[in-house]
Image: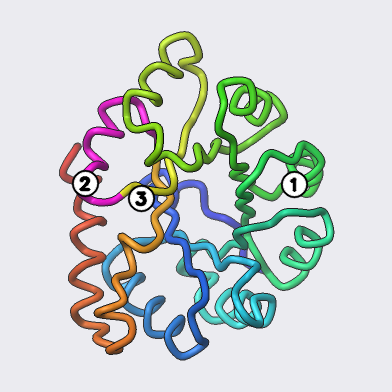
Amino acid sequence: MNTFSKDRFQQMPIIGILRGYSPDETNGILGAYRAAGLSTLEITMNTPNALHLIKETAQKYGSDLNIGAGTVCSLNDLEKAVAAGAQFVVTPILDLDIIKRCCEMGIPVFPGAYTPTEIFRAWDAGATMVKVFPAGQLGPDYIRQLKAPLDQLRLLPTGGVGFNNMEAFMEAGADGFGLGSSLFPDRFVKAKNWQALQGHFKKFADFFPSRA
């Protein structure tokens, strides 16, 4: 079984959020994603046939991409996702039992949290990075204010984050991004215009090397 590549994620700390796409759409997206230089995606558990999709994509792309499970809300979800081949786990909420179990299994976990207390509890419990969600409601200043007293935190703003505000979030102290609709425009996906989608992805991929 392929495992999560920390190096791959550190070089390109974007988690693409795939929610509700068909197997055909997912396959097209992943091909363009890999070709553009992006490397980490989650398939949400509320996607139809999510476990089958995770299994198929992990088998096909797991040696080149980090393939994880998102919207994991219970230990049962976690066990099923990992059994299907998920290399990492993302949650929309803080569940300390999920974090603990991921740590026991050696599975990277990105738990969702909102308040300073939730975020610190998630980090202290062993989170790989804390998904600050929904970040768009709080803005970059919230990340900056969190990091002032708690500079050890590694934070992944998610929800309301797009190319236009990534720079502001990064300057505020963000360590990566969870990106959904802003990364996967329907106008490209529904038209199966994978070449245009790859070009769109490349814009995001270029954001990180340009900062070196």
**Tag in front: 2 or 1:** 1
* Quarter of the figure that contains the C terminus: top left
Quote the CA–CA distance across marks 2 and 3.
9 Å
Q: Secondary structure at mark 1?
A: helix
Q: Pointer 3: what residue?
A: 12
Which residue is labeled 1 in the image?
Answer: 102
Front-lying residue, 38 or 186:
186
- In percent of width and height, residue 95 lies at 74, 41
Give the CA separation, mark 2 to mark 1. 30 Å
* Residue type indicated by callout 3: Met
Q: Is residue 8 above or below residue 51?
A: above
Q: Image quadrant of residue 191?
A: bottom left
Percent of width and height locating residue 189: 32, 81
Secondary structure, mark 2, is: helix
Indicate the quadrant where residue 141 lies: top left
The image shows residue 127, relative to residue 143, as above or below, that is below
Q: Earlier in the sequence, mark 2 or mark 1?
A: 1
Residue type at mark 2: give it.
Answer: Pro
Residue at 42% in and 48% down: 159
Name the amino acid, label 1: Cys
Q: Is residue 48 magenta?
A: no
| Span of residues in magenta | 162-175
Does 165 appear in magenta? yes
- Quarter of the image with the N terminus is bottom right
Q: Pinpoint residue 125: horizontal percent, then vertical percent.
A: 72, 29
